[in-house]
Image (tube, rainbow, N blue to C red):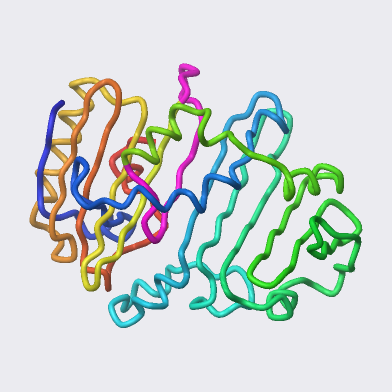
Amino acid sequence: MRRAAGTALLGGVASLAGCFGGTGGGSWDTGREGDLQPWLYDPASHRSDVTDYVVGYWEPATFAASRDSLGESASRVQRYHAAAPEDVEFTVELGGASAAGGLPYVLVSQGSFDAATVRESLTSGFGRVGSVDDRPVYGDGTDAFAVVADGEFVFVRGLSWADAESYVAGSRSFAGDDDRLVNFFDTVGVGANAGFRLSTDDSGTPTLHGHAYRIDGGTTDARALRVPGVDDARGEELESYLEQVRSSVDRLRSASAEYDDERVLLDLEFATAQAPFGVDPLSNFGLR
């Protein structure tokens, strides 16, 4: 395994990069993916020739508890509905594309909010259409449905009612069956914010780009993973870039990268107040 190390990123890159935890096991939290995994549907079960499958994960309550440390970073925190952030344990957003068309869009939030509050997030076009496991379901008359219950909000677009009902009530095991996702959860975890994208490169090789941010008071660690990795030539480019930006931005407290032909792993540490949550920093190094 090759390693490149530095302590800062250029301003333009730092505006997009995140903060990652230490390499290896360390104290990186890989136990909270249990909130995300159960909602990950298999994209191939909905479309053939899937080109992209994109997932985002946020823990609004964690960000709310860290508001004193967030500073300018607070503007990057996603808010999807009327519930107060401190009442939302987590939110998962899923979507993607295929040669045959878009994948179903799904938004799931769970927490301690009440149903009436989140119901306000639905437009006037939604009306009660049924129930799933005693939870009320609303629809807009087309392909959008929402489950609204105390502590749970599930919004689905791009599915028939039967498929939406099956998704909400069904068993989803895709995360445990895909080696790339197992690698992501084992290596990166989810922290307070995470995202990943499954796709294929120009040669048709399956790829994963994933990242996560973990807040610890005034410091935010972040980690990004790319599978597969890079050859020595591309790795040396990454080393060279890290060296160039090593002391250029004070918001980045440390940076390191490991790479081989199987994966690239990037770790960064930022001041929480300047951590640009929600962005995969490896994309700033041309590793798309």
Q: Residue at x 58, y 34 (%)?
A: 174
Q: Is residue 234 magenta?
A: no
In which quadrant will I find the C terminus? top left
Q: Residue at x 42, y 33 (%)?
A: 182
Residue 74 located left or right of residue 171: left
Q: Position of residue 261 (x, y in %)?
A: 27, 20
In which quadrant will I find the N terminus? top left
Q: Nearer the viewer, residue 119 or 30?
A: 30
Q: Nearer the viewer, residue 254 or 119?
A: 119
Q: Residue at x 18, y 39 (%)?
A: 257
Q: Is residue 189 magenta?
A: yes
To which quarter of the image does residue 91 belong? bottom right
Residue 80 located left or right of residue 251: right
Q: Nearer the viewer, residue 273 or 169?
A: 169
To which quarter of the image does residue 248 belong? bottom left
To which quarter of the image does residue 239 belong? top left
Q: Quick one: which residue is furthest to the top in this view? A: 203
Q: Position of residue 20 (x, y in %)?
A: 26, 52
Residue 137 located left or right of residue 12: right
Vertical comparison of 119 with 188: above or below: below
Q: Position of residue 171 (x, y in %)?
A: 67, 40
Q: Position of residue 191 (x, y in %)?
A: 36, 56
Q: Nearer the viewer, residue 44 or 99?
A: 44
Q: Which stretch is magenta?
A: 188-206
